[in-house]
Amino acid sequence: MKKALALLATASVAALALVSCAPAATGGSGDEGGQKTLGIVALVATDALNAAVIEGATEEAEAAGWKVVVTDTQGSPDKANAAMTAFSTTQKVDAILVSAFASSSIGAGLASAKAAEIPVVSWGGELVDGIVATSSALKVGEDSVNAMLEDFGDEGEVLALTYHTGVLCLYRGMAFEEAMGATSGIDVTSNEVAIPGQVEDGTAFTSAWLARHAEGSGPLAIWGAWDEPGMGAIAALKQAGRTDVKVYSINGAPNALQAVQDGTMTQIIWQDGHTEGVELFTAAAESIEAGDAWEQKTIDVPGVLVDADTIDDFLAEHPDALS
Amino acid sequence: MTLTTDPGTAAADVDRRRDRRRVALVLLSRYGTLVGLLLMLIGFTIQAPTTFLTVPNFINILSQASLTAIIAAGLTMTLVVGEFDLSIGYVASFAGLIVVGFIARDGVPLLLALLLVLAVGGGIGAVNGLLVTKVRINAVIATLGIGTALVGVGFAYSSFPIAAGVPVEFTSIALGRPILGIPNPIIIMFVVLAILWIILNKTDLGQKMQAVGGNIEAARLSGIRVDRVKIFAFSTAGICAALTGMLLSSLLGSGTLAAADGYLLDAFAAVFLGSATLRDGEFHILGTLIGVLIIAVGFNGLSIFGAPTFVQPIFKGAILVLAVGLSTLARRYAKA
């Protein structure tokens, strides 16, 4: 056993030494056949919106003859940096798409990509040095809170289910807080949900908030930074048999759209993750073509307001949205 | 005036003081968490009599606690036999996803789908048990590995939430209130807890489980089939996790990947809180229920007061460390 461990340790050290002695790679196809590769670093690949972005980018990349490699970091910035470094040095991808990480948290990964001259596009992250294009996360938050205020009015009680750790929800929360700060008639209770546990927390916070806000106590609403805590809130409302509370959310996962259809969700800003994925890959490919002439840009794919009045038209236009 | 002390009397006084201290510490270690729960109930009631101390709010608390209690009760079984199960949250999430998939996407009849998914949960638990007992993989590694793999399997099954075509019969499981207006999950929770309590405390199998957890070598030497007992415990945990996942999906009206992952830590917190209740650090079903209630009551009360969000995890962590720490210290000094 000791001999086996010693051999394993020696092999590991040798492998590390070989890796550290390897010459620095530069951007370019790792494949001998010349096929380009897109490396995707996903925050949580199992999240519906992340999956839509990945799907959009993958379809567009494969249509352009690229190969796609996805790393699911399960929300870990450390894993994101490691994945970007591996993409830049050993896997030698041609472009990297980073999904839903704050750009400030992937400094090491960005440095590796920059050293290897690999363009990085970010879904929702800040437009810092090393990122050629990003998609705006603030816009969707603004769309959501503006639509909510138009529907709900400027007086009442709102429970906000926030998540400041994820960059998309951080920006959405910022937009929400700014709008609420300018609306003196609304009393906001903010609760930060945890991941994992976002659905459970949405249910638990809502149940307690309902205990404090009896039926008929005034205009009541719940705003979810994204669908999952919102769905948890709906579960709590169903448990309590309450129909006097409006629920607003962002993303538009199939279950949330279904909730709009059955009347338990008031309004959603549907974020077209698939199109954002397509646009981000296109920007990455174009930046390679443009070389030094490329200018950083922010891609704005507007959200779509989905409520009881528009759900049928929306589903006619997006028949796959529920599946 | 000269005072003299009879050495015999002094020694007896010291012994009496030591006995009183020992009794006090034993009481603290066994009933400290119950006293804590009672104090919370009194405190929240005084602070918010019109909102906290209401029947609907207590039903809410029990509803919130019900799913955690079911999954935590299953976990209790594995801890009783001296093992860990880190896959329960993932099993619950996976079960919640596939049950909706079976019903809404694949057209499997409701009852058959429920039984199938319970069997899947039990099967995953059995695999955990086999890996731990036959392959001799450490339980933490085996269950973490299986749980992580399940995330991938679930993702392969459906990367998006499944919501279309969920029948009302399925959502009625969690939302129905056929008995005295009590939500079904609460009733299911008490049924599950009662069954597991009977198994652990009133059956030969339960005695064997406790023997395995207490001293595995002695249990083996006394002829107990240790591996079988452990596999049963893991299977039970898997079934309870699957049931939790199905109830959550019924509540949500959809199957969502990772929806139940958060139950893992809550279940562990509740079970360890329960181990510091009524017994000297032993895992048991009633203790687990009390542990779940402590967390649920604390969470509910703090939310009603509108306490800042950061207070919640601080409370949860502090109550866990305090309860288990106090219990451990009290036991140690009581034996001294």
Image (cartoon, coloured by chain):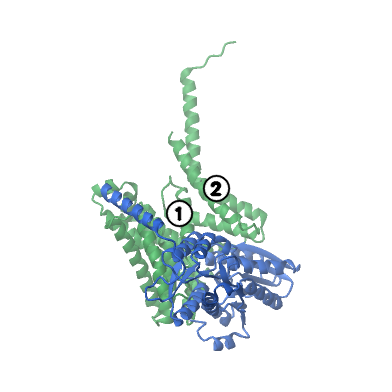
Chain colours: A blue, B green
State yes or no: discs 1 and 2 in contact (Cβ < 8 Å).
no
- The residue that mark 1 highlights is B271
- Residue lying at 40% horizontally and 83% vertically, measured from the top left: B107
- Residue B76 placement (x, y as % from top left): 41, 56
Q: Is disc 2 surrounded by few (<14), some (14 to 19) or many (20+) residues within 10 Å?
A: few
- Residue B328 placement (x, y as % from top left): 46, 42
Q: Secondary structure at mark 1?
A: helix
- The residue that mark 2 highlights is B35
Q: Chain of mark 2?
A: B
| Residue A245 can be seen in this image | no
Q: Is disc 1 surrounded by few (<14), some (14 to 19) or many (20+) residues within 10 Å?
A: many
Same-chain status of marks 1 and 2: yes
Q: Is residue B176 left or right of residue A23?
A: right
Instruction: Identify the amino acid type marked 1.
Output: Val
Quadrant the N terminus of chain B occupies: top right
Observer-nearest of A189 and A23: A23
Observer-nearest of B179 and B322: B322
- Residue A239 placement (x, y as % from top left): 56, 70
Q: Which mark is residue A171?
A: none
Label whose residue precedes the other's in the sequence (1 or 2): 2
- Residue A183 placement (x, y as % from top left): 74, 69
Q: Chain of mark 1?
A: B
Q: Is residue B213 left or right of residue B93?
A: left
Observer-nearest of B247 and A3: A3
Quadrant the C terminus of chain B occupies: top left
Q: Secondary structure at mark 2?
A: helix
- Residue lying at 40% horizontally and 69% vertically, measured from the top left: B152
